[in-house]
Image (tube, rainbow, N blue to C red):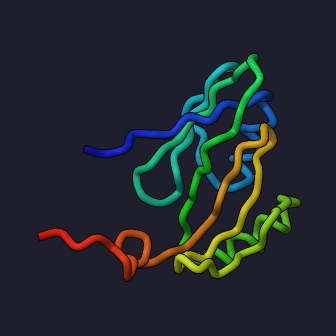
Amino acid sequence: MNLNQVTLPVSNMNKAVSFYQILGFTLIVDTPHYARFECPMGESSFSLSLESEPMTHGAVIYFEHPKLDEWVNELLEKDIVFSQMPTDETYLWREAVLFDPSGNKLKLYWAGDNRLNPPWRVQTV
């Protein structure tokens, strides 16, 4: 099994598409109500869906980058605002936090081997 994609609700498609392009994602589908992006590394994708109903934001999307601090600095130069600068977390991930124009919470992070193999990983027999 493999995760295909995550779709985020957005209230303004043009602002959202521009925001994710500034972050460095490649736009591969562009319609007035739906957009899809490829991640610059790996084979992952995610999409945006224009919603007219009030949105609730319960999900957090994580985008991984091995040079997190450099990436954050590049985004700061492009006027991207962060609510948390890169921070070493107790669960051994380094994370920066920001929100897209529709209020979706994003975490840019680097976890290295701890992403799938933290010291507290459940041991299988």
Q: Is residue 113 above or below residue 16?
A: below
Q: Nearer the viewer, residue 56 or 114?
A: 56
- Identified at 55% across, 73% down, the residue is 110
Kindly indicate the quadrant of the structure image that contains residue 56.
top right
- Identified at 58% across, 80% down, the residue is 90
- Identified at 70% across, 68% down, the residue is 96
- Position of residue 18 measured from the top left corner of the image (x, y, whole percent): 76, 42
Kindly indicate the quadrant of the structure image that contains residue 3.
top left
- Position of residue 34 measured from the top left corner of the image (x, y, whole percent): 62, 24
Q: Nearer the viewer, residue 54 or 29?
A: 54
Q: Nearer the viewer, residue 103 or 4?
A: 103
Q: Give the farthest residue toward the left.
A: 125
- Identified at 44% across, 49% down, the residue is 44
Q: Quadrant of the C terminus?
A: bottom left
Q: Is residue 74 left or right of residue 93?
A: right
- Position of residue 115 measured from the top left corner of the image (x, y, whole percent): 43, 70
Q: Quadrant of the N terminus?
A: top left
Q: Give the farthest residue toward the right.
A: 79
